[in-house]
Image (spheres, coloured by chain):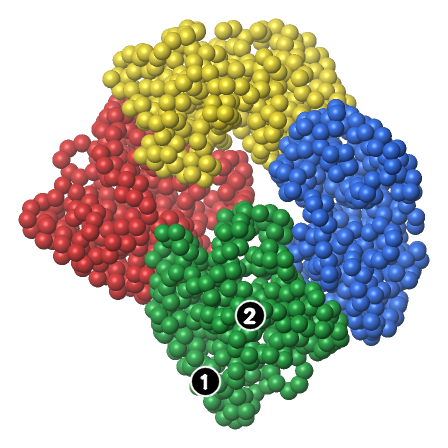
Chain colours: A green, B red, C yellow, D blue
């Protein structure tokens, strides 16, 4: 799928991306936009302001006329080189600036950036747009979490993003392995963590031709998946016991049937839909239960690169897919100089790579080399899995 | 001071109290009204809805036409007899109903209550009005906390409630003690925890003729008040060390001067104003430092009852005053039957009594027998102290 | 009951108390004596060393020949005036000095104290002996806790202290109340917190003629005592839910019967024995369930003083009895000057008073004015209750 | 270095390993052997019993005559397939069985195993011996931690294990990379996590010819290593701030000089000794500060395999060396069937691999394919680092 914008038309690209954020926020009132439902999630208002700050800080330089100097503190996410900032877990305390003031901030920066781009391209524009697209997805994830912990489970929108049902039962795709090139190369945009492109050695393996479905997950649950320690990594079993997991996040039984809270509200679990909101631990345990395993990120990429747009196989657009690979730098990886060098590299520990892209990912945002990453216990992303085996 | 309403005119009383709540909420936008800044504080919106629920539940009976049945869950505070409820620490997750929907809920219940009262008095009206007045004060306290943890320290209102400066230096009021009657009796309204009226024996003692001021507190700080363990109760010293206390809550040094964040914004500490936002531990340590002590609640009441409206002595209207008395039932205390019996009695442990009334207390709400209570580490109330000594 | 020693014979008194500590430690091996089973409990070895340090510090002066200067740090409990000390929760990290070295420390200090006392009386001897007796009881309580959390529930000693069974069913003792003198006066020893003696006013009331028994507690359990929130203080109900309480500490059901772990090992609960290891919250809830209440400490003392040695009524020697009174200073209370002034006063907040004395209290140690105190959630003392009602 | 035993002489091998454990425990009294100084560390007594239980359970079968059936609960470490067990964090509550009883347990099992082995070899003997050797190292690590948190910092033994000083300044070893075989193959013993042997692709790189020294670490400290966020992974910087790290574990400044607590007691830091007790985060930050990086475990292995016994290069025998590799299964890895399959596989998440072997590792225990692993914040192992760079 192609993105609906191209950096070769910078002003239009900028407007397209920025307007999409506003559209995503539109169903949410001020109350919905300010609350932080857990330390890892951010308020919608904060996403809208932070993405704006990114353009101000890195394209315009801090101190754009009409903006508030305090925003440099309030809306810096984690850039140590920029300076001190509001603690991540305390973003929900920022009732000011109001939603309307954040909208005005967006307008003010939009005008300045547009003026800048009318004068010519900017080297960090593309990064800023992809950055904003990442926050578009985070915004949806965070809203889904917010509404999942509300006792009434309100809907974000009747047609809110949701994984598409699969079209058939899973078969295997055979791959020969061998020496394979992975990682990004070439002229298109990629984040720094996707490179350098390099060779890896793979053994022969198989990948499932679609993600695991909710129906298959119900079998796992019914077969004692959440009560059999032998299926789990030790840390995963600890989470199961401590947190009382007995199904994916946002699932609960009502009148004997599993229901799931989605961005469209709560409804019955549909067997053909890919399972989502599972942690790495659950994905790993499911795979073991099935006598399979999770693929490495390179096994995943080697096959996906050649079949990226086959919709029956759901490589992207439906669920992020946990891989067996820890999130680590590629050989020869070097972060960029300056503050933007903090973008990815400093998070390369304690996380696992997910590949693909989900229903909440902006169209065209992902690619076969894209590396998403979360802690192994995280469940609020649209995270599912695809099985692999040795041949 | 007289309250601006009388229960002998029920409709007018109801409207007066209800409108005052709305006036207090008026300076706050939807963002300000939904966020919960700590587990002990509640969002403004929740206060507005909970006080409404109280009238619905106890005067009208749950299920008033036009209201949402879920509100019985969302806005029940702690009444086990009513049923399950949103956990206190999670009130800030309730982005829905919106502020506008809560306003509509208020209107709907107001109409039904007004209709009810036009048919005659209701035995729980007065309790409901005093209950709402308590939440008016909580609303202001909670907003003060919310804005105190915002890095920009916004003002609630330029003329937000603040303790009035004292008019002179403190002298002592001598009291003979002996057998004294304390507690509420008679026909006026009082909460159940103010009775039964009973006799207590007091030794001769002295009470200061005004609360401790910020200027005196600065002397305490300068004399090492927060670094000398011998001044403190053991649990209090633990709080000092764990939480890094070095002055009252909402104080910080800027350019060498103590500043305080008030409902009117941040400004220099004024020496003649009563100190406020101190914990029981701090009040107790200050008294020890001064070679004095805190009065018991009965010592306080015995003097205050006779001098209640002497404004130079600030018995009420400025700061709540910590007493040495633990919050316990009076001899012969019996909670009311039914859910309203949970109003006070079940909190009678682990807290200390404060007497008086503060700048955020609705006019006429307090009286000499009034018993306020907080945990000894609490600092977000407008809590100060008045010294006592033996004679 | 008389204590087995008298301060009029100081050397003999000293030896008697010191030897009793050693006898209590005798059934315990080095492993048992070094482990700390929870932050509030101390290792036996630490009790043996700390009581010795008390004599060294306050009678001899720190630095007795043959002792280790580090002990002043290791075995100071909470005396800020003496200097820094091992954190309370970290006493279990002190594998050195060994149990044998602590025994040698005791011998060394014993010789020096004995020599001192042979030269004449010392004003702090009596305090030191009562202090050591308090630690004798703590030693047993702490061992009981240590063995209760061992999966095999070992016995301290077959005949370890245990509350004596009651001899009959409970009746009421009528008391007229009125102006009553309470608190210690006269020449006998008392802790500072027992005075000054003063008058209090009491209403007519009744006290049960014996403590509540295990059989009665079983009725409470069977009647839903631990699942009915209306019986509980709010903080108590929180503990029930958070900690999963469903019976007194050290109780569990085995094959359908309640068993209790005692210092003599685990055995069936005996209906006629006083219940023990209940928190203030449980005591309060039980009383409410029975339509009664807990007595104040003064109601308790006024009756107990006149009947102290009636064994059928178990005023002491069996269980400590929770009272409704918060632990606060008496009117006119002043701590002693110097470090020993930290003995009691600085703990006068957040606790409730227990009266009486238990099976683990040294003979003759307690008296009718004795004030024991624990936090309301504490259960590892031999804490039970006696009911009261208004007349 | 060769191990001092061979499985071809099973009885002698068994005795050799078992006696070494006893020798390691010999300097420790019962008090030292029972205390658990943190949840991740185990008491010496527990190590002695658990290694014995391993032989009982897996060679003899539970229920050897003369042993106590409760030991199956008490001394099972983490084998879900064997059954329930004492929680890891509660091993320090086990004052019983005593040290002497554990010694008797060892003797009893030793006799039965010896008798078994006299009848012929056993397939799990070798695993049991390597397992016990691992616990020999853990015993020393855990004792080092125990004594490090004792305020007097006692010595385990004057000649306790300590990293050997390096003989010269670091140079680089060039490696060509390419397709390299890694992992264990062949007839010698290896743990399951060391295989299957497989090929990996490596780029040209360099490895330092010795580990980083304390002198170099002091330069890092002096250059602001612990106060410059740009040097750290985000999670690592969080640890620095939260835990107040400013040097390796067990270091502190005394009179201006860095001192370190070792198994031989506290003494000045020696510049030529390899640094030890650093976390992965610190190792990673140090490498970044030096313009280098950590090697992957395969880069490390490829060079070490050819130079294993060059003592100037300290591949083993001095410090474990953090690698950039997350601890994950090798391609084709399958745990063994049955309970012993829980040995390694279920821990393959959230940890990083260390290679080499340290001063506390039993002689001959390690090999070039050996994979040790710890969480990235762990510092109580003898963990250091060796630098790498790209060529």
Q: Nearer the viewer, residue B365 or A185?
A: A185
Give the quarter of the image for residue A290. bottom right
Q: Nearer the viewer, residue C296 or B288?
A: C296
- Residue drawn at (51%, 58%) of the image: A217
Q: Residues within 10 Å of mark 1 (few under 14, many from 20)?
A: some
Q: Nearer the viewer, residue B111 or A374?
A: A374
Circle 1 sits on which residue? A16
D47, above or below B178, in the image:
below
Q: Residues within 10 Å of mark 2 (few under 14, many from 20)?
A: many
D100, above or below B107, in the image:
above
Looking at the image, residue D339 sits to the left or right of residue B171; the answer is right
- Residue drawn at (35%, 62%) of the image: A154
The secondary element bearing badge 2 is classed as loop
2 or 1: tag closer to the N-terminus: 1
- Residue drawn at (52%, 15%) of the image: C162
Residue C238 point in image, percent of width and height:
41, 39
Circle 2 sits on which residue? A210
Q: Residue furthest bottom?
A: A119
Residue A370 point in image, percent of width and height:
60, 75
Q: Chain of mark 2?
A: A
The secondary element bearing badge 1 is classed as helix
Looking at the image, residue D221 sits to the left or right of residue A313; the answer is right
Residue C142 point in image, percent of width and height:
58, 25
Report if residue A349 is visible in the image: yes
Quick check: do tags 2 and 1 share a chain? yes
If the image is split into quadrants, where does the C terminus of chain A sit? bottom right
Q: Chain of mark 1?
A: A
Report if residue A71 is visible in the image: no
Q: Nearer the viewer, residue B241 or A208?
A: A208
Query: How far apart, in angstroms, are the residues tagged by discs 2 and 1?
Result: 32 Å
Residue B303 point in image, percent of width and height:
26, 33
Mark linked to residue B339: none
């Amino acid at each position: 799928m192609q993105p609906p914008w191209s950096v070769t038309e910078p002003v239009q690209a900028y407007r397209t991306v920025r307007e999409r954020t506003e559209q995503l926020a539109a169903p949410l009132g001020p109350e919905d936009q300010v609350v932080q439902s857990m330390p890892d999630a951010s308020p919608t208002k904060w996403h809208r302001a932070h993405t704006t700050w990114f353009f101000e800080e890195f394209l315009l330089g801090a101190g754009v006329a009409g903006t508030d100097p305090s925003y440099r503190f309030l809306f810096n996410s984690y850039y140590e080189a920029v300076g001190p900032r509001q603690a991540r877990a305390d973003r929900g305390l920022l009732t000011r600036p109001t939603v309307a003031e954040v909208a005005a901030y967006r307008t003010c920066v939009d005008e300045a950036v547009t003026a800048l781009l009318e004068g010519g391209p900017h080297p960090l524009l593309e990064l800023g747009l992809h950055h904003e697209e990442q926050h578009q997805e985070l915004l949806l994830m965070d809203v889904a979490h917010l509404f999942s912990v509300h006792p009434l489970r309100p809907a974000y929108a009747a047609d809110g993003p949701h994984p598409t049902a699969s079209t058939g039962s899973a078969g295997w795709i055979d791959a020969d392995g061998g020496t394979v090139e992975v990682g990004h190369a070439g002229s298109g945009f990629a984040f720094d963590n996707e490179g350098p492109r390099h060779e890896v050695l793979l053994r022969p393996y198989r990948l499932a031709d679609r993600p695991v479905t909710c129906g298959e997950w119900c079998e796992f649950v019914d077969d004692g998946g959440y009560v059999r320690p032998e299926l789990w990594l030790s840390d995963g079993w600890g989470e199961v016991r401590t947190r009382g997991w007995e199904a994916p996040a946002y699932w609960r039984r009502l009148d004997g049937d599993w229901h799931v809270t989605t961005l469209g509200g709560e409804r019955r679990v549909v067997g053909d839909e890919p399972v989502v909101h599972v942690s790495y631990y659950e994905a790993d345990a499911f795979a073991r239960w099935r006598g399979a395993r999770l693929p490495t990120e390179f096994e995943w990429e080697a096959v996906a690169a050649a079949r990226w747009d086959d919709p029956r196989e759901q490589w992207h657009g439906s669920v992020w897919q946990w891989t067996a690979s820890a999130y680590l730098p590629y050989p020869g990886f070097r972060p960029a100089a300056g503050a933007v060098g903090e973008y990815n590299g400093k998070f390369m520990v304690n996380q696992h790579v997910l590949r693909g892209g989900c229903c909440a990912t902006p169209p065209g945002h992902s690619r076969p080399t894209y590396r998403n990453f979360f802690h192994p216990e995280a469940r609020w992303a649209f995270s599912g899995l695809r099985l692999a085996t040795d041949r």
